[in-house]
């Protein structure tokens, strides 16, 4: 049997997903037996021109991490889609937009002003901002265009599978790779994870009745070791997040932040968490309810930490 | 702006507010035709998702009408709504959508007049706010994976 051809790419991402692909440990040798990596900017020196020369559909699978934020991201997403039989949105950025997607609370102008002018460590008295074209003595230089709105991979090209996580856990990565290697592929559109249920389903903490009088941020109190974090008032996102990670964060006393995306069948993870969270506020008095809600300083950023571009509203409206 | 006729979605609970709207109708009370009533079994059935969906496909305002506190047919459905809407409003503000575009009111089955008044009052306040830009973005369903 001919070896599989695999491509890996990063768009708007932090690089954590690249490390996550290596986190499969010695299984990488198993992968190397059956697959060749034909494109991987982080690890191997191939150029975009090399990919352009490949025949269409000549790559068996592309693991694409990172959101779509620039014209370069979009161009390569479309190029790799054309060259790949299977396109996998690997990691939360390409699946839902993730942390780069939080930029959708702003637009290009506001992002540039913050990043290149306002930040305290920036020294830019002439207020120079990135341009798509710049003339220098040697000729004209081009930079990719920076978009106003961050998009997910599926909002840009047709995607076959999604691998959730920021970054995906080792066992989740292997689940996807194993499916590729063995050829036992799930139906198109599947979010590849060991669970279709919520993180709570895997969490070992004791769960009783959820009634909250006050919300706490993780630094404000030390959690009790065995009781459900949500019941203790921490904004634990487990109730609205797909499992498969093994509920690692709650085991380590950190509330789930929602990186595995919505549970099966749910559209707009943030709205569902909002709904679940508000319902368990222990008060029937509008004034007290308002006071309890005031403890959540940044609801939009908390509920859409990983999924603003994939949410129904997709971005904030800027006046 | 003078000709702006807002699109308003009103989620009415089956047991109180929908009957209240019915009473307004059978009593021949006049109210703004901008309201599109959607009957739900309980205001507690109104997942914030419904409100976001309405706003994202072009509603300029969303009304959620339920039984008065203590009157819920399901005992505490409307209390859940009472807790969700202020949090939703706080979140919408961060997303650049005026919180006045979403309003929660209690309308009982006997309050046809209140239903008409709320409908008129809310329509006027949305007219004052102007068209919403929240529907200006393409829907996920058009190009994304979600239906």
Image (cartoon, coloured by chain):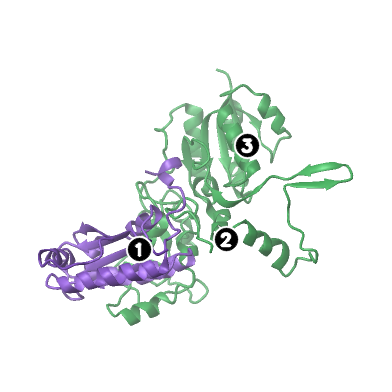
Chain colours: A green, B purple
Select label 1 or label 2 by which is in front. Answer: 1
Classify B9 as above or below A296: above
What residue would you read off at disc 2?
A106
Nearer to the camera, B65 or A303: B65
Q: Is residue A50 visible?
A: yes
- Disc 2 is attached to a residue of which chain? A
- Disc 3 is attached to a residue of which chain? A
Q: Quadrant of residue B73?
A: bottom left
Secondary structure under badge 2?
loop
| Disc assigned to residue A22 | none
Labels 3 and 1 within one chain? no
Question: Which x, y percent locates residue A28?
Answer: 60, 36
Q: Is residue A253 visible?
A: no
Q: Are marks 3 and 2 in contact (CB under 8 Å)?
A: no
What residue would you read off at disc 3?
A76
Secondary structure under badge 3?
helix
């Amino acid at each position: 049997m001919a070896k599989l051809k695999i491509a890996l790419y990063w768009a708007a991402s932090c690089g954590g997903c690249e490390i996550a692909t290596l986190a499969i440990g010695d299984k990488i040798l198993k992968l190397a037996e059956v697959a060749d990596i034909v494109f991987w900017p982080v690890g191997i020196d191939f150029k975009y021109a090399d990919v352009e020369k490949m025949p269409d559909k000549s790559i068996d699978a592309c693991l694409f991490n990172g959101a779509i934020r620039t014209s370069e991201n979009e161009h390569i997403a479309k190029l790799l889609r054309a060259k790949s039989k299977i396109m996998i949105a690997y990691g939360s950025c390409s699946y839902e937009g993730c942390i780069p997607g939080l930029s959708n609370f702003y637009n290009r102008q506001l992002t540039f002003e913050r990043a290149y002018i306002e930040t305290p460590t920036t020294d830019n008295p002439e207020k120079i901002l990135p341009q798509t074209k710049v003339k220098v003595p040697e000729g004209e230089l081009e930079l990719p265009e920076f978009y106003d709105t961050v998009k997910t991979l599926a909002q840009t090209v047709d995607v076959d599978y999604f691998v959730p996580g920021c970054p995906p856990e080792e066992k989740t990565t292997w689940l996807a790779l194993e499916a590729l290697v063995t050829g036992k592929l799930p139906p198109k559109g599947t979010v590849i994870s060991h669970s279709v249920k919520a993180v709570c389903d895997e969490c070992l903490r004791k769960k009783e009745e959820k009634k909250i009088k006050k919300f706490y941020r993780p630094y404000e109190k030390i959690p009790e070791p065995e009781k459900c974090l949500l019941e203790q008032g921490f904004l634990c996102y487990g109730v609205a997040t797909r499992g498969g990670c093994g509920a690692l964060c709650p085991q380590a006393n950190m509330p789930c932040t929602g990186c595995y995306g919505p549970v099966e069948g749910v559209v707009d993870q943030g709205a569902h968490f909002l709904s679940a969270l508000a319902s368990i506020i222990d008060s029937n008095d509008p004034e007290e309810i308002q006071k309890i809600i005031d403890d959540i300083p940044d609801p939009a950023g908390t509920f859409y930490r990983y999924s603003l571009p994939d949410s129904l509203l997709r971005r904030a409206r800027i006046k | 702006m003078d000709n702006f006729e807002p699109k308003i979605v009103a989620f009415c609970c089956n047991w109180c507010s929908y009957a209240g709207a019915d009473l307004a109708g059978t009593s021949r009370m006049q109210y703004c035709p901008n309201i599109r009533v959607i009957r739900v079994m309980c205001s507690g059935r109104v997942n914030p998702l419904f409100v976001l969906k309405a706003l994202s496909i072009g509603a300029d305002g969303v009304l959620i009408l339920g039984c008065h506190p203590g009157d819920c047919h399901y005992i505490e459905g409307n209390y859940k709504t009472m807790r969700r809407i202020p949090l939703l409003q706080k979140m919408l503000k961060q997303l650049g959508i005026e919180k006045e575009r979403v309003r929660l009111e209690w309308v009982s089955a006997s309050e046809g007049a209140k239903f008409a008044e709320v409908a008129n009052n809310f329509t006027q306040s949305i007219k004052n706010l102007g068209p919403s830009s929240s529907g200006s973005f393409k829907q996920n369903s058009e190009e994304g994976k979600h239906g």
